[in-house]
Amino acid sequence: MKKLAVMIALPLLLAACDNPWLDYRTGERDALVKGWYARENPPGLVPIYCYKTLAELECFDKPRENDERQAVWTYRAADR
């Protein structure tokens, strides 16, 4: 009986607690306006063009015109 009372009281007690990190959360809008996020041309990154193979990705510096495989666009760090 004592275990049952603890199992009922513990979730009720925890549900009454306030989340201290709620004030620091960022929404989608806040994340999108950050300086490090650029949708079209991320700073310091170069696009690479990868195509799915059976086991892994095959990547190239330029897109391939007649490649029928599924394309996966990604970025790599620019050479400095």
Image: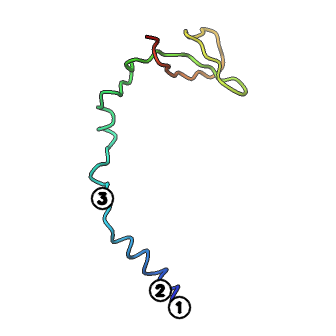
Amino acid beneath label 2: Ala
- In the image as oriented, which residue stretches furthest toward the front? 80
Q: Nearer the viewer, residue 73 or 5?
A: 5
The quarter of the picture where the C terminus appears is top left
- In the image as oriented, which residue stretches furthest toward the bottom? 1
Helix, strand or loop for disc 3: loop
Which residue does the numbered mark 2 point to in the structure image?
A: 5
Amino acid beneath label 1: Met
- Residue 6 vs 56, above or below: the answer is below
Helix, strand or loop for disc 2: helix
Verify CB contact (< 8 Å) between mark 2 and mark 3.
no
Please tell me in which quadrant of the rendered image residue 34 appears.
top left
Q: Earlier in the sequence, mark 1 or mark 3?
A: 1
Which residue does the numbered mark 1 point to in the structure image?
A: 1
Which residue does the numbered mark 3 point to in the structure image?
A: 20
Verify CB contact (< 8 Å) between mark 2 and mark 1.
yes
